[in-house]
Image (cartoon, rainbow, N blue to C red):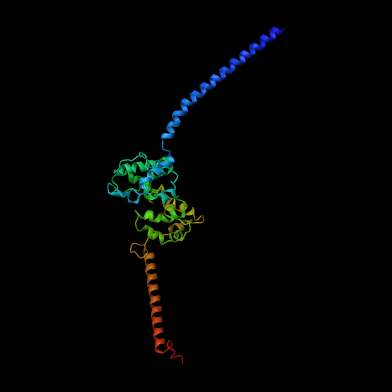
Amino acid sequence: MAGGARNSVSGLAKEFTFLMRWAFSAFVLYLAALMLVAVPALAQTQTTVPETSLTDRCLTCHRQEYLGRLQVDEQQKDLYVDPAAYKDSAHGLLPCNACHTGFSHDPHQMVTNAEFFAETAGEACRNCHDDQFEMYKQSYHGTLTRDIASDGVEAPECVDCHGTHAIQEVATLEYRQSIQDVCGTCHGGRESTFLDTYHGKAITLGREAAATCVDCHGAHSILPISNPQSTLSRANILSTCQQCHPQASQGFTTFLVHITPTSPKAPVIVFLVAVFYLVLIIAVFSFGGIHTLLYIYRGIKDGLYFGKGGH
């Protein structure tokens, strides 16, 4: 009995020793495999420039104001980038090559092809703003980019409205106050007639809720008023106004915005009222001015201003 017990214990010890050796061998093999995978990956990580530093690498040159401009077809591309403006922009946390696809942090060759810039800029915006880009492509602006026979009209790209390195959040008051000037770049004169309205005066004075061009015409899906899908078509204009004026009726939509009242091209009634208003102002101030001059003359004649009169 005692000998059998000893043999049993000895067998268990041998099995335990075998299992420990097997486990240790497996652990060594696991460490070896881990080193084979981790060391090359670590080396690659150490030789790759982190994306967060790409912007700093690019700004090493592009933060220099003397860098100048680049002639791209008939346009001038400014090579200077204001680091502070870029940092405060909506894209301030993105590395440069998030938009400038095809460029590395290494010294690169100048590109003077406008078509290349337009294509890469559009695709860069599309990578993050696909929904807005698709709406833009179906809009009047997007149609111009595909219409070769557009009578020489230059189609606006994303950067023409939003800017480049100092892109602002569209909901900010600063950006909303700049919209009429952005639109006025291509639609000259319209911004001044907009500023003559209540909406224009309110947004200028800082009322963020006041309507701007895009609130009425749309932003990325702008269409001609003649298009039934336009936000200002006869079928949709009332619902557009009711977004800010829920109680608006159909008569509300007859409000005239982009007109110069004193222009002969304005509606007759508007032109006549504007002319009458100007004539009335001139007459009132002329009468007041003549009356004031006569009053001063009488005062001088009677010596009211020099202590000689008064009786």
Identity of the residue furthest to the right in this view: 1
Identify the residue at image location x=69%, y=7%.
3
Asked whether residue 122 is in view, the answer is yes
Question: As rendered, which of 28 and 207 lies closer to the eye?
Answer: 28
Compared to residue 71, the image places residue 47 above or below, namely above
Can residue 125 be spotted in the picture? no
Horizontal and vertical percent position of residue 262: 35, 65
In this view, the residue in front, 9 or 297, is 9
- x, y percent for residue 229: 41, 47
* Front-most of residues 89 and 179: 89
Q: Residue at x 56, y 20 (%)?
A: 24
- Which image quarter: residue 143? top left
Task: State the residue at coordinates (61%, 14%).
Answer: 15
- Image coordinates for residue 18, horizontal then vertical, percent: 58, 15
Q: Is residue 39 above or below residue 181?
A: above
Residue 211 falls in which quadrant of the image? bottom left
So how many labels did they put on this image?
0
List x then y, in percent, for residue 185.
35, 54
Q: Quadrant of the N terminus?
A: top right
Please identify the quarter of the rendering in which residue 309 is found: bottom left
Position above or below: 36 against 283: above
